[in-house]
């Protein structure tokens, strides 16, 4: 039965480290949710997962799995008593056991007979397509097969919580994609709550019901994949989930129609007029006025510096002079991508935009016009504090 | 328009051209080092390892071939070595070595575990202590123990009248104890390496999937099985081929071991080389079998558990009581292994040879510098050590380069086998082979009159050290990317500069450690020295043994203490110089970089 998870103000500092690995992380995960924790190396996602597993002890805060508090500042339930399973980054298959024995091991806690354990393990191995490899040792299996054995071991005990520690990071691109689909379907079939960590935003968006983004030990945003992509809470989240580029701009004026007029030193006439630009982090489908009160960029006033974060989907290369460009630049690089071309464009005085897609070809050095789509542009105050500053971190719900 | 088609002939010419003018080229192909280097190296290996040892071993089966008997083929000497006193010696060696190997494992495993996986106090000193023990030849602690417990020894002089202790140490128990303690560093190093590579994941995975701490430990012990088997095999091989304890404590306890029996077969009058060769066969067999089984077991269970993503294991925080118990246990072990024999040696060097009181005196050390013939052997051994270590590391590096080539040829395969088999040759067999081979009439005919010369002794030192050196260096050298040297050369460095700038820094530390290990080994080497030293030029170990066996205990112990001091001073100076003068980048590679 799927278990809910509740993490309250969890803080963890490793012995000898000066900076906490996790800073007051709070998170609620509903039963059966596939939660992906996304963040770069050192952001604390592995530490959070290991705290959930009981491999690491927490310093303060509390951690509950189902109705039971499994860790707080004083008590710590050991991993073997948390009734969960885990897929490790290196799979951690015991090298002296066959694939069958590795999988059967996870059933020992169910107090079944050895024969029953092995029979169920064989069934599970056939479910992951490894029936004929049951008697092989891990070093006789390919990376993908080892991955499947690790997955079978995690699934067989039918625990309410499955933890996945970057299980696809050691696989090549093609196999990674295939295994991603298998993990997604098998884990959802099992119906367990899943916490999956990765630093790959594409993998996160493809797998998750909910995503939590970690930065320097702080959970900076949590929400559905669409929310996180469309309404990034901070420049870091925007950056980590994929940007074409960032332009330093200044708010010139608020238009009566909800538009924001931005000025930028490098722009030809000193200003760029963007219709109905949404301040970053604002939930909602399309344009919101710049005065929206609950958004990070909502307080921006004329004359203030800001950061314009542009998704690849938020910028397009103009083919003809029919439309007025928002920005002009010069082609720094072009790469043929089959269905079209991907450009790197230098915008004089502002920087470089990458991943700009167009169906038509322009050559290196050509001057081009760019049009921004407010759906893919997010405006942040230029002085927005990074994660880990003294700002209180609100509890996030997945 | 540019054509993309290239005629096959042009490609072929291009390849030939590349071959002719490749960066490695520097003259006609047949003159290149690669062409004559391998045969020359094989010639050296045949001259110093293969022929002496092979001749000696074949002698047992065909004495007529060497004018040592009438039979072209016989098993008489092999049978003879399995009867009477030699059989007793071999049986003794077998059970003593097995017991020592088990003892080494039983101590080495927990010590390695405590040092690698817990917060035991003093854990950082354990590795240094093990290396210290490894650098000491086995006869040194043996003589220290002897001097401590023998009649009129230090123990009796301080008033401890414990004849039971004398009987205990001067007998099979003492032999097993000393050889077992000798095995501990080997076990420790083998198991530590495995523990370092084991990472935390296997234990975590077990616990996450329902195993208790104890069950998780039981689960991962089999993963260490290859290391445990290595520890047992190496311990057994080291013990059965040991000559230091056999010629000192065991001999003085009237407990016969195979290596000393072999030596006696040659040293007694009339010498029996065929019988010694028969015993050599048995010794080589006894060493080879466990090493072969271990190599086979390792091949079959290559778990390859070390990866770039291996998570460093978390040390278990010991409670105060556990810390005290663990720290005391390990300290006690070092006290028995190093402290007691060290105390025996140092106090023995500060006592007069006769009398029964514990009155300390410097007279033995004064004698070292006043009497002729006492310091000379130490100086001599130091020179032998310097020459041998330098030559061995040079040849060992070449051998390692040849063995680590990706393209495996019959020649490199044979060399690999020869060097691996030679590791299993006890020093005393090497020495006996040298005596026999370089005493053959054909040597005089060829004007190779090396028998009973210093040169032959040094060659034998090199030959016996080379296999181990090559095996040790092959690990580091096989990690060298050919592109390192190529990159240096492609960017304008000549062959020598390219090697010195691109390759040497990467292997400098292993080369240095191999040099030091060889130096220390040769400086106090016993079996080869015993069999091959030139008359009138005894090396350090022989001089010390002579003094001890002639009841000049004080002077002999003073020589031992001074010799150990010199050996460690050389180690300290060389490592200090490396630390001070080697470029920072050299020191980073292969060192422990703490993040």
Image (cartoon, helix red, strand yellow):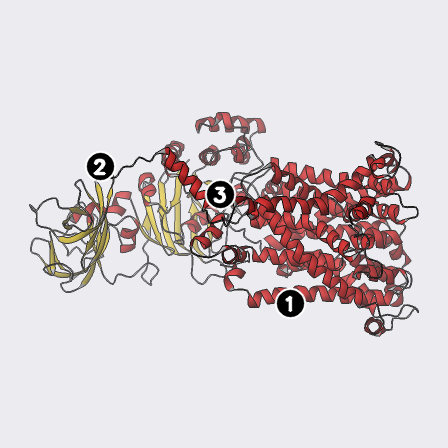
Q: Is residue B496 visible?
A: yes
Q: Are marks 3 and 2 in contact (CB under 8 Å)?
A: no
Crowding near pointer 2: few (<14 within 10 Å), some, many (20+)? few
A52 w.r.t. A135: above or below: below
At horizontal 69% and vertical 67% (from top left) the residue drawn is B569
Image quarter hosting the C terminus of chain A: top left
Residue that badge 2 annotates: A339
Q: Position of residue B190 (x, y in %)?
A: 64, 48
At horizontal 41% and vertical 36% (from top left) the residue drawn is B12
Same subunit, labels 3 and 2: the answer reads yes
The subunit carrying tag 2 is A
Q: Position of residue B517 (x, y in %)?
A: 67, 57
Q: Taking B177 as reference, is A202 left or right?
A: left
Same subunit, labels 2 and 1: the answer reads no
Instruction: Tell me, for residue B573, which label it has, or none.
Output: 1
Q: Secondary structure at mark 3?
A: loop
Front-most of residues B4 and A164: B4
Q: Secondary structure at mark 2?
A: loop
Q: CA distance from mark 2 to mark 1?
A: 67 Å
Instruction: Tell me, for residue A82, which label it has, or none.
Output: 3
The subunit carrying tag 3 is A
Q: Taking B472 as reference, is B240 left or right?
A: right
């Amino acid at each position: 039965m799927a278990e809910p998870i509740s993490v309250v103000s969890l803080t963890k500092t490793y012995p000898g480290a000066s900076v906490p690995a996790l800073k007051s992380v709070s998170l609620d995960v509903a039963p059966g949710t596939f939660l992906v924790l996304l963040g770069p190396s050192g952001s604390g996602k592995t530490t959070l997962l290991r705290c959930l597993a009981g491999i690491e002890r927490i310093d303060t805060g509390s951690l509950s799995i189902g109705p039971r508090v499994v860790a707080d500042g004083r008590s710590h339930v050991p991993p073997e008593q948390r009734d969960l399973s885990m897929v490790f980054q290196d799979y951690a298959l015991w090298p002296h056991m066959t694939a069958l024995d590795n999988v059967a091991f996870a059933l020992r806690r169910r107090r079944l007979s050895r024969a029953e354990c092995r029979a169920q393990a064989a069934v599970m191995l056939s479910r992951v397509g490894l029936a004929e490899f049951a008697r092989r040792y891990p070093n006789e299996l390919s990376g993908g097969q080892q991955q499947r054995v690790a997955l079978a071991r995690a699934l067989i005990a039918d625990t309410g919580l499955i933890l996945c520690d970057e299980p696809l990071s050691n696989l090549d691109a093609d196999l990674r994609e295939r295994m991603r689909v298998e993990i997604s379907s098998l884990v959802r079939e099992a119906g367990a709550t899943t916490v999956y960590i990765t630093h790959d935003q594409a993998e996160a968006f493809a797998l998750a019901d909910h995503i939590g983004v970690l930065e320097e030990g702080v959970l900076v945003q949590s929400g559905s994949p669409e929310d996180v992509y469309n309404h990034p809470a901070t420049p870091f989240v925007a950056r980590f989930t994929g940007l074409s580029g960032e332009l330093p701009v200044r708010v010139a004026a608020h238009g009566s129609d909800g538009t924001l007029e931005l000025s930028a030193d490098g722009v030809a006439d000193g200003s760029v007029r963007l219709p109905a630009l949404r301040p970053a982090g604002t939930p909602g489908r399309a344009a919101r006025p710049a005065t929206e009160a609950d958004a990070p960029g909502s307080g921006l006033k004329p004359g203030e510096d800001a950061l314009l974060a542009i998704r690849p989907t938020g910028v397009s290369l103009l083919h003809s002079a029919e439309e007025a460009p928002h920005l002009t630049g010069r082609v720094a690089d072009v790469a043929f991508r089959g269905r079209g071309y991907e450009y790197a464009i230098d915008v004089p005085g502002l920087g470089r935009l990458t991943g700009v897609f167009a169906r038509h070809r322009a050559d290196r050095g050509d001057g081009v016009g760019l049009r921004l789509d407010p759906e893919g542009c997010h405006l942040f105050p230029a002085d927005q504090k990074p994660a880990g500053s003294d700002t209180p971190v609100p509890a996030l719900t997945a | 328009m540019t054509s993309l088609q290239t005629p096959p002939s042009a490609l072929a010419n291009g390849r030939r051209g590349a071959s002719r003018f490749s960066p490695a080229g520097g003259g006609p192909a047949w003159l290149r080092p690669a062409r004559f280097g391998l045969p020359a190296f094989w010639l050296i290996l045949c001259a110093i390892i293969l022929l002496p040892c092979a001749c000696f071993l074949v002698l047992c089966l065909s004495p007529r071939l060497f004018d040592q008997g009438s039979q072209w083929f016989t098993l008489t000497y092999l049978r003879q070595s399995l009867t009477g006193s030699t059989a007793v010696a071999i049986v003794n060696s077998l059970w003593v070595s097995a017991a020592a190997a088990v003892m080494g494992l039983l101590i080495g495993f927990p010590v390695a575990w405590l040092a690698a996986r817990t917060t035991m106090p003093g854990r950082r000193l354990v590795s240094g202590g093990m290396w210290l023990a490894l650098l000491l030849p086995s006869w040194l602690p043996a003589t220290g123990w002897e001097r401590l417990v023998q009649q009129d020894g230090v123990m009796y002089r301080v008033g401890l009248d414990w004849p039971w202790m004398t009987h205990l140490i001067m007998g099979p128990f003492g032999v097993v104890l000393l050889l077992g303690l000798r095995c501990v560093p080997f076990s420790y190093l083998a198991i530590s390496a495995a523990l370092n590579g084991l990472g935390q994941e296997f234990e975590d995975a077990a616990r996450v999937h329902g195993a208790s701490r104890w069950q998780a430990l039981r689960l991962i012990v089999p993963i260490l099985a290859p290391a445990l088997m290595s520890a047992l095999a190496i311990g057994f091989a080291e013990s059965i081929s040991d000559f230091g304890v056999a010629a000192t404590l065991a001999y003085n306890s009237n407990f016969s071991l195979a290596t000393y029996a072999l030596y006696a077969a040659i040293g007694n009058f009339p010498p029996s080389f065929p019988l010694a060769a028969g015993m050599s066969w048995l010794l080589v067999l006894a060493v080879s079998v466990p090493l072969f089984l271990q190599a086979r077991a390792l091949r079959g269970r290559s778990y390859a558990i070390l990866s770039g993503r291996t998570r460093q294991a978390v040390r278990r925080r010991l409670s105060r009581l556990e810390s005290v118990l663990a720290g005391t246990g390990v300290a006690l072990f070092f006290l028995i292994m190093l402290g007691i024999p060290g105390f025996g040696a140092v106090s023995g060097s500060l006592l007069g040879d006769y009398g029964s009181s514990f009155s300390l005196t410097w007279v033995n050390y004064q004698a070292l510098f006043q009497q002729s013939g006492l310091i000379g052997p130490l100086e001599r051994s130091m020179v032998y050590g310097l020459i041998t270590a330098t030559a061995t590391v040079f040849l060992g590096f070449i051998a390692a380069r040849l063995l680590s080539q990706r393209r495996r040829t019959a020649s490199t395969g044979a060399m690999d086998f020869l060097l691996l088999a030679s590791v299993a040759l006890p020093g005393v067999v090497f020495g006996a082979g040298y005596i026999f081979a370089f005493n053959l009439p054909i040597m005089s005919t060829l004007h190779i009159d090396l028998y009973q010369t210093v040169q032959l002794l040094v060659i034998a030192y090199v030959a016996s050290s080379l296999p181990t050196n090559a095996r040790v260096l092959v690990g580091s050298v096989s990690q060298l990317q050919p592109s390192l040297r190529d990159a240096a050369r492609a960017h304008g460095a000549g062959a020598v500069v390219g090697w010195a700038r691109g390759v040497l820094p990467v292997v400098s530390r292993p080369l240095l450690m191999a040099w030091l290990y060889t130096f220390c080994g040769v400086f106090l080497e016993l079996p080869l020295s015993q069999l091959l030293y030139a008359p009138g030029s005894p090396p350090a170990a022989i001089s010390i043994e002579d003094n001890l066996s002639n009841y000049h205990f004080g002077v002999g112990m003073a020589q031992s203490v001074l010799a150990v001091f010199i050996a460690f001073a050389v180690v300290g100076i060389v490592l200090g110089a490396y630390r001070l003068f080697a470029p920072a980048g050299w020191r980073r590679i292969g060192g422990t970089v703490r993040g």
